[in-house]
Image: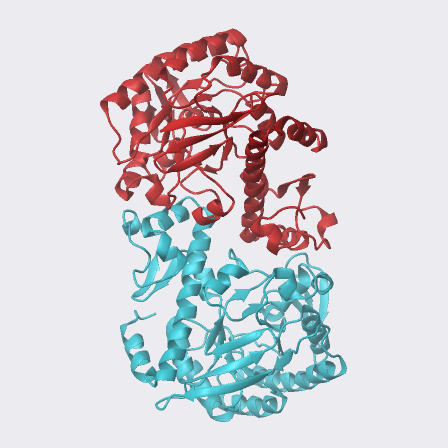
Chain colours: A red, B cyan
Amino acid sequence: MNFKVLKTDTNSSARTGILKIDHGEIKTPIFMPIGTHGAVKTVTPSELKTVKSQIILGNTYHLYLRPGTELINQAGGLHKFMNWDLPILTDSGGFQVFSLARLNKINDEGVKFQSHLDGSSHFLTPEKSMEIQRKLGSDIIMAFDECPPSDADEITIKKAVNRTKIWIERCKQYLNDNPPVYDWEQTMFPIVQGGVYSELRKQSAEDMIPYAQCGIAIGGLAVGEEKSAMFGMIEILDELLPKDQPRYLMGVGTPTDLIQAVQRGVDMFDCVIPTRNARNGQLFTSFGKVNIRNEKYKYDFNPIDENCECETCKNFTRSYIRHLFNIKEVLGLRLATIHNLHYYLNLMELMREYIQLGDFSKWSENYLNNYEKE
Amino acid sequence: MNFKVLKTDTNSSARTGILKIDHGEIKTPIFMPIGTHGAVKTVTPSELKTVKSQIILGNTYHLYLRPGTELINQAGGLHKFMNWDLPILTDSGGFQVFSLARLNKINDEGVKFQSHLDGSSHFLTPEKSMEIQRKLGSDIIMAFDECPPSDADEITIKKAVNRTKIWIERCKQYLNDNPPVYDWEQTMFPIVQGGVYSELRKQSAEDMIPYAQCGIAIGGLAVGEEKSAMFGMIEILDELLPKDQPRYLMGVGTPTDLIQAVQRGVDMFDCVIPTRNARNGQLFTSFGKVNIRNEKYKYDFNPIDENCECETCKNFTRSYIRHLFNIKEVLGLRLATIHNLHYYLNLMELMREYIQLGDFSKWSENYLNNYEKE
């Protein structure tokens, strides 16, 4: 696995590059659709390719509970299980354990929790998370980190930074002792924590950089803090993180977030927004958001976005999609998901093109000025 | 619109033919997937074509209530509204009014009912049903008939037969006075009623035949009667109905029903079974039914049916589809729907081929003997 920066913008830290992975090359900056349970909700792998997805994300916590690591291992790994032959990144399970499950105990050893599904008890450790991700066979493994709640104070965040440092060494040790179970390379991205505290971010970056082989992640942002605080942290990290590795900003964000993060040197993103909002009827367009359930689209026989070339816009009208939402027909969820994913992935492609052309600053300024304020 | 029988089986009444319609040619015998509200649940028009759907059915009652006839009219008709450019048949709305809505009053004039959605009052008459179907723009319009409940006695059925006769004349009159609103031809299929009473069936056939221009339907079967009674009625009608027009058996059925009805001279079918059962996890295969939720498929990495060439079987395993049902992921409903529709439409294609080859009797006997008893 290797990463090569092809071009860096002269007026910002934005850059475009290629991340070479055994399952395919990823052109950055890139957005990763979320396939929580081994499926990006409502759509097929073939549709994901049509909207130009290059890599998707799987959730270790969810897959560990259902269908279970052993089943996916027997299937030949997550790629084969879900019939997706391009790269996959899996998270460590930590975020869901801290946010979804009922926590019983956290200590330096690991996290004891109860499943949100049936209350069954589980113990997740750095080693266990690595073991699961080895068996899932993801191309990019995420380190097991402590994710403090969004309202945590500085002392709590500091403890999490310190624990994350202890855990990354154990993750590395496990991976060194236990090679991949399939015949493709896996790399681990360490995760920089530190909340919105500059010194803790710097400390965590220093802790994590030695473990980054071909990529590093920024965690613990977009969890409720001010946008300015988020971008401030990214700016600090932009200075500190190695330029020759991709930076992955976890859980971000809106279209304007993506552009502003790319300006600050971020290369990879994942977020539920395009898919979840699609299922709620909120669609992204070149002129802002469209709530397709709105009465005003009842007799509107135009596509969602006349400038859009997705399969939904090529074939169906606002009136029809509104009708599908109205009758709770799942085809509507599909058509909306396809449109929003296309919007996001097309936005990333535009960024890559404008960075390559040297026009990124002008383009992004224009986009940010014209896109409705969120 | 015209129908041509290409070949009739020497040992049965099975025949294969072509029904020419402005929106395309239909090879018979054919099965019509049901697109209740202007969408075959979970799938796109393009997927319907991939599984070889030649014609689909729309429900007048549902479309009249949501999104409403005027909206579809403004969209340019149902084909354009839902982006389906092949033939469409619409039912008259009668069956749903009699089975779904709260009936207030039935008399010779029409049926007063309350919407099952919001309790609003509506009055459906032969003229109103024709007006709606003109505006929907279906290629095949179904006559407005009285559908007695499945447990109705002979006197009630006789009354329905008589009222259906009165109503067919009014349907015809309306259509004569009101030409199509779009630039394609529409034909009306009259519907033979009469329950399981031979004399009433004969009477109703006699009543309806004069109104059949290019097709006639058999209604009021598959509503709870014994299979033998159903096939008995079809045999009687096979003798009486014109050979040079397609016969449409409404609401039928299972794979073995379809074969046995084709043996008795039926050309067209519609039924919720393939799509509804798919959404419940029941899948049709060359060796019988598969309930994909079953625990025994948990580690089964084979396709649903190894002999099947549908997109689902080409790309996904039983284990994966079971998992999707387990997590209530709508992609599972899609994959199951595609498989079942492919199974049904492939079955119809096999029948056409074997009739053409002169091997239908042998093939159908073999199929009926080997398919699990339903």
Viewer-proximal residue among A218 and A299:
A218
Quadrant hosting residue B126: bottom right
Q: Quadrant of the N terminus of chain B?
A: bottom right
Relative to B62, residue A47 above or below: above
Could you tell me residue A298's position as x and y percent?
71, 53
Could you tell me residue B159's position as x and y percent?
61, 84
Quadrant hosting residue A352: top right
Residue at the spot 48% in from the left edge and 87% down from the top edge: B5
Could you tell me residue A88's position as x and y percent?
39, 35
Viewer-proximal residue among A303 and B342:
A303
Relative to A300, residue B68 above or below: below
Relative to B25, residue B3 above or below: below
Q: Quadrant of the C terminus of chain B?
A: bottom left
The answer to whether A189 appears left or right of A30 in the picture is left
Residue at the far left: name it. Answer: A177
Residue at the spot 24% in from the left edge and 25% down from the top edge: A178
Viewer-proximal residue among A218 and A96:
A218
Residue at the far right: name it. Answer: B177
Residue at the spot 54% in from the left edge and 40% down from the top edge: A275
